[in-house]
Amino acid sequence: MDSELVFRIDASIGPAKPSFLVGDPTGWTKEALDAFIRDARDRSQVFSWAPDHRTLAVHCTENPRLSLTIECWEAAPPDHKTVAWQEESATVWDRLDELSVSETGTGRWPLAPITFNWLPPGPFHVRCRVNGREHFNEFMGSDMDDDEFDDYFLRHPERYLLQIWPTDPETD
C-alpha cells in the first residue's frame, strides 16, 4: 500500500546563525533550551536530536539560500530516489502536539506553530535529510563577486526535508 501525503509545507529560511531548531516549543524552559542549543553546536553533526523535548537542531552552512520542507505522511513515505541526500538522521517522538521552526540563539519560536490535534496520539517517526551542503564549500574556495555569489546560491540551494509519520506497531 502506498502512503498518502497528508500535508507539505515549503519555506525559505534564513537563520541569523548557521543553525535552526524544528520541534515542539512546549515544555522548554529558557535555561533548558539555551543549554540544548549550546550542547547542539557540535559542528561534526548536521542533526542533533532532543527526543525528550521533541526537538531537532539543524546545523546548516552559511548558505543564504536555505529551504525547509516539512511533510506529514499517513504511513512511511516513499523514498525520494530523484534526490541525492547527503545526510539523514531519524528518531521517534512519543507525541507531536505542535511543530515550530526557530532560529537558534534567539530562544524564540518565530514561525506560527503547526498544530497536530487531528493526528493519532503517536508515537511518530521523524526523519530529516539534507542536500546541497557541498556547494557552500565549493564557494568558499572561489573569488566570486556579489552578483556571482547571488547567482551561484540561487542555482545551488541547501535543502532540508523533515518527514513525519506514525509508527506502525505491527512493523516497527
Image (tube, helix red, strand yellow):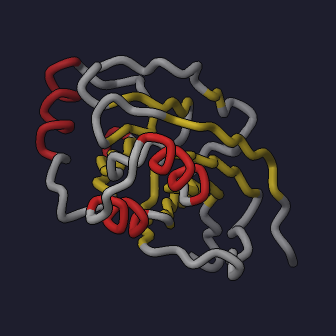
Could you tell me which residue is drawn at 28 percent across and 34 percent down? 17
Above or below: residue 50 compared with residue 130: above
Could you tell me which residue is drawn at 64 percent across and 68 percent down? 168
Q: Where in the figure is residue 22, as x and y percent of width and height?
A: 44, 39
Judge whether residue 51 can be spotted in this image. Answer: no
Q: Where in the figure is residue 114, as x and y percent of width and height?
A: 63, 28
Q: Where in the figure is residue 71, as x and y percent of width and height?
A: 68, 51
Could you tell me which residue is drawn at 28 percent across and 20 percent down? 107
Above or below: residue 43 compared with residue 169: above
State the residue in front, 103 or 113: 103
Judge whether residue 132 can be spotted in this image. Answer: yes
**Number of numbered discs on residues:** 0
State the residue in front, 121 or 59: 59
Above or below: residue 96 compared with residue 2: above
Could you tell me which residue is drawn at 85 percent across and 74 percent down? 2
Instruction: State which quarter of the image contains the C terminus.
Output: bottom right
171 relative position to 135: left or right: right
